[in-house]
């Protein structure tokens, strides 16, 4: 029996560094990664790497290109799970994945300590598995606290 | 050697100029910068626009301390290599980012030991003096998320 497939999608830079901190939890899955970094990260057990166009909500044409690319990856790979740590490219992948009823997981970046990111606020309408790394943000509707990606107590008053 | 990094997405001329002014006043200081494709070209230290992820990690490893924008990639990598990190937040009013979330993130991360917020060359000079005072107390942080967070995600993915 072939192993289940997890598609991880995120922007490059910090979003990718956050995502790579989660890889031990992907055990048992065949992992496909799509990101905006020029090359696949070194030393990772990744079946395939897709490079995406970087875009954000203010870049309409680039956003369309990213939308097209993420659709191609989602429909070609047919993953069981799609997981993202942000931002726009990950959200677009979740939108396409929702059409195929996969399990969708959104983990909002630790860079949003006072409010869920714009993508995260949309993602919570796409999936029950929408998480924050800040305990005080789980008050937002549809958002749960997963834990932090670094072992440091940065909570207010800590 | 001090490693300056502004990340891969946007230039950050105000930080590059601040470090350049500091180097002009401290000729003995050795700085190497990854400064993006901004307009400001430093005269008092060596710099390149971009580095590969591998090259960037090796600069972090070599550096005595790090000066950076408030990027999660920069903060996590500095923590992983136990390097003090001096940070300036990108501000929307200078068109350095879309919003001021780096200011929020900096408020949280400056609660950590060895994370120093700055706004100008004087504060940079003070931060570097402070950062150099207790080099022996630094602890490294694992490459991976804490086990409690990984277990929470394993349950979601099961």
Image (tube, coloured by chain):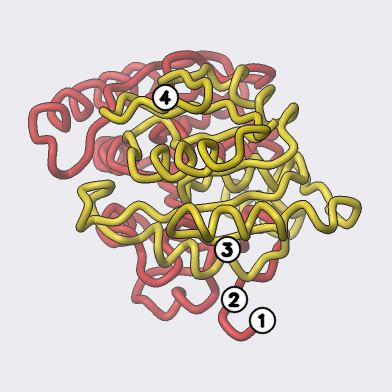
SS class, disc 3: helix
Of badges 2 and 4, the one in the foreground is 2
Q: Do the residues labelled 3 and 2 touch (CB within 8 Å)?
A: no
Q: In this view, does B109 lie above or below A65?
A: below
Give the chain of mark 2: A
Same chain, labels 2 and 4 = yes
Percent coordinates x, y for residue B113 in the rendering: 72, 64
Residue at 27% across, 48% down: B97
Residue ID for mark 4: A34
The foreground one among A110 and B93 is B93
The disc, 2 or 4, on the residue closer to the chain's N-terminal end is 4
Cα separation, mark 2 vs mark 1, equals 5 Å
Give the chain of mark 1: A
Give the chain of mark 3: B
Q: Do the residues labelled 2 and 1 touch (CB within 8 Å)?
A: yes
Give the chain of mark 4: A
């Amino acid at each position: 029996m072939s192993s289940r497939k997890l598609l991880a999608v995120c922007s490059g830079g910090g979003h990718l560094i956050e995502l790579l901190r989660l890889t031990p939890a992907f055990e048992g899955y065949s992992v496909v990664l799509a990101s905006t970094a020029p090359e696949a990260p070194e030393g990772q057990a990744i079946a395939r790497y897709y490079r995406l166009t970087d875009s954000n909500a203010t870049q309409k044409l680039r956003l369309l290109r990213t939308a097209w690319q993420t659709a191609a990856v989602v429909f070609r790979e047919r993953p069981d799970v799609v997981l993202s740590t942000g931002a726009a490219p990950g959200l677009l992948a979740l939108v396409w994945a929702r059409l195929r009823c996969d399990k969708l997981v959104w983990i909002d970046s630790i860079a949003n300590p006072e409010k869920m990111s714009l993508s995260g606020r949309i993602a919570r309408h796409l999936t029950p598995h929408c998480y924050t790394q800040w305990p005080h943000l789980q008050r937002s509707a549809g958002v749960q606290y997963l834990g932090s990606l670094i072992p440091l107590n940065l909570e207010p008053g800590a | 050697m001090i490693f300056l990094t502004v990340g891969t997405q946007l230039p950050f001329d105000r930080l590059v100029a601040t470090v350049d002014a500091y180097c002009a006043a401290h000729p003995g200081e050795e700085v190497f910068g990854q400064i993006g494709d901004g307009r400001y070209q430093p005269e008092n230290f060596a710099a390149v626009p971009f580095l590969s992820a591998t090259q960037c990690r090796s600069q972090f490893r070599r550096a005595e301390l790090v000066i950076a924008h408030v990027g999660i990639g920069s903060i996590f990598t500095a923590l992983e290599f136990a390097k003090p990190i001096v940070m300036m937040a990108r501000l929307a009013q200078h068109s350095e980012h879309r919003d001021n979330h780096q200011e929020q993130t900096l408020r949280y991360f400056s609660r950590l030991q060895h994370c120093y917020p700055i706004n100008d060359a004087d504060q940079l000079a003070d931060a570097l003096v402070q950062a150099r005072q207790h080099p022996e107390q630094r602890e490294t942080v694992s490459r991976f998320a804490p086990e409690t967070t990984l277990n929470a995600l394993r349950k979601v993915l099961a």
